[in-house]
Amino acid sequence: MTERASPGRAEILAAAARAFAEHGYHGMSMRDLAKLTKRSPATLYNYVSDMPTLLHAADCVISKAGGLIVTESLACGLPLLLMQVIPGQETGNAALVTREGAGALVTDPLLLLETLADWLAGDGRLYRECVANARRLGRPQAAYDAADLIWEVCRRPVPDHSRRFPISRAKLKALLQSFGDSMSPADRPPA
């Protein structure tokens, strides 16, 4: 992905360079820099220990299509603007979000802004639809549902598997060994 120059970027970089030269890197905050360049301050988080609190305070999520952030966002009823999709592992996440109308795939900053403008136009009708679709897809109780299912399975009596197989364990081992004998040495599992 190539980095494109945006309007004002050169101004921000020049102001940052002057401010850092005068006050030092640690002597300036993002808020100071935003004030200096007459822009709204932004907050970027590298790691947070309480993601649910941040998600419940958000109106939407701008992220890559990772499995955890997608499921957490949907569980909170938050529409997603997906900026990046890693082929394979994240393709299905992005397809689900876009197919079900719970968000959009935005491949560059301009498309992101256009999508946000579309969502908010007409009294936010599209945004509200995305929220409704995210809530429909979200499973905020999924962990509890999984725990209940596991508990129920564990409470069932253990079935007697001895009658299920018409072949003895010794014959089964011999059969598996014959498959192993026909495998090349490189394909055989370690002993």
Image: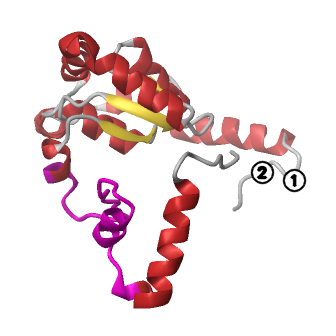
Circle 2 SS class: loop
Q: Which of 129 and 144 is in front in this view?
A: 129
Circle 1 SS class: loop
| Image vertical order of residue 154 relative to residue 129, above or below | below
Q: Position of residue 53 (x, y in %)?
A: 13, 52
Using the image, tell me which numbered label, if any, was put on residue 188: 2
Q: What stretch is highlighted in magenta?
A: 26-53
Query: Could you tell me which residue is drawn at 43 percent across and 12 percent down?
Result: 99
Using the image, tell me which numbered label, if any, was put on residue 33: none
Which residue matches tag 1? 185
Query: Residue 41 vs residue 148: left or right?
Result: right
Query: Residue 11 vs residue 80: left or right?
Result: right
Q: Position of residue 126 (x, y in %)?
A: 28, 13
Residue 12 lies in the magenta-colored region: no
Q: Do the residues labelled 1 and 2 touch (CB within 8 Å)?
A: yes
Q: Can you tell which quarter of the image residue 191 is in?
A: bottom right
Query: Which quadrant: the N terminus?
Result: top right
> CA gap, disc 1 to disc 2?
5 Å
